[in-house]
């Protein structure tokens, strides 16, 4: 008995989700197809029913991660009622939190996958770049506050780069020196919160 198109699409989504979690946790090269398919609940032989190659899967993972990251950013930067002007402050506080740092599987796809993207095929890099570009534009509309200006995109890029960099550095040292990892988050959060429009 064959698999319906709907079930095939759900199976593909399950594989992409499992790959995204594993890639964020251990890097793209650190995950084999057998392990990946087992984590998704399938046999390795079924992989090629959904993807031409691991590179094809990686491209799908990056595209999905960028899309979901953009959706999360949209939600985070949407005011929660009349007069809510603290969206940027909330986003910085959440992004540079210990909870977000420790949730590698579901955390920011940019921080989780950026180091691997530089070694991927140009088409995959393009998906990542497009998503990053949209994120900068989206953040720029919030950074401008009550008086948006021409420099808002530049400020948004700097803000986002500082947040991602702090998260990546904190994750890099958390097992070796938790106090240092926490300090990186706290000092970056303090610096950025003093600079965001309030």
Image: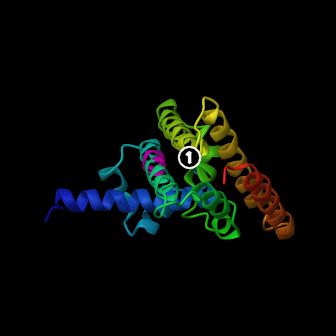
Above or below for 138 versus 153: below
Count of labels shown? 1
Nearer the observer, 129 or 40: 129
Q: Main secondary structure of the magenta part?
A: helix
Rendering coords of residue 7 (x, y %): 23, 62
Q: In this rendering, does residue 164 appear at all?
A: yes
Rendering coords of residue 192 (x, y %): 74, 52
The residue drawn where x is 62% and y is 36% is 152
Query: Badge 1: how crowded within 10 Å, few (<14), some, or many (20+)?
Result: many
The residue drawn where x is 77% and y is 53% is 194
Q: Which residue is mark 1?
A: 142
Above or below for 162 versus 82: above
The residue drawn where x is 86% and y is 69% is 179
Horizontally, residue 10 falls left or right of residue 98, namely left
Quadrant in which the C terminus appears: bottom right
The magenta region covers 61-66
Residue 64 lies in the magenta-colored region: yes
Q: In this rendering, does residue 29 appear at all?
A: no
Above or below for 139 versus 94: above
- The image quadrant of residue 98 is bottom right
Nearer the observer, 179 or 74: 74
Residue 158 lies in the magenta-colored region: no
């Amino acid at each position: 008995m064959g698999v319906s198109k709907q079930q095939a699409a759900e199976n593909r989504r399950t594989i992409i989700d499992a790959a995204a979690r594993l890639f964020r946790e251990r890097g793209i090269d650190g995950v084999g197809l057998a392990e990946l398919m087992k984590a998704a609940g399938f046999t390795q032989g079924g992989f090629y029913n959904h993807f031409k190659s691991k590179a094809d899967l990686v491209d799908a993972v990056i595209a999905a991660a960028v899309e979901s990251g953009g959706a999360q950013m949209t939600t985070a930067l949407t005011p929660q009622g009349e007069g809510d002007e603290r969206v940027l402050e909330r986003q910085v506080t959440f992004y540079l939190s210990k909870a977000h740092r420790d949730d590698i599987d579901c955390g920011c796809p940019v921080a989780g996958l950026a180091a691997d993207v530089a070694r991927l095929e140009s088409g995959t890099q393009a998906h990542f770049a497009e998503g990053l570009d949209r994120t900068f534009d989206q953040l720029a509309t919030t950074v401008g506050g009550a008086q948006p200006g021409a420099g808002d995109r530049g400020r948004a890029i700097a803000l986002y780069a500082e947040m991602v960099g702090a998260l990546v550095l904190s994750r890099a040292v958390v097992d070796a020196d938790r106090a240092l990892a926490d300090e990186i988050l706290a000092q970056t959060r303090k610096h950025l919160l003093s600079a965001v429009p309030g």
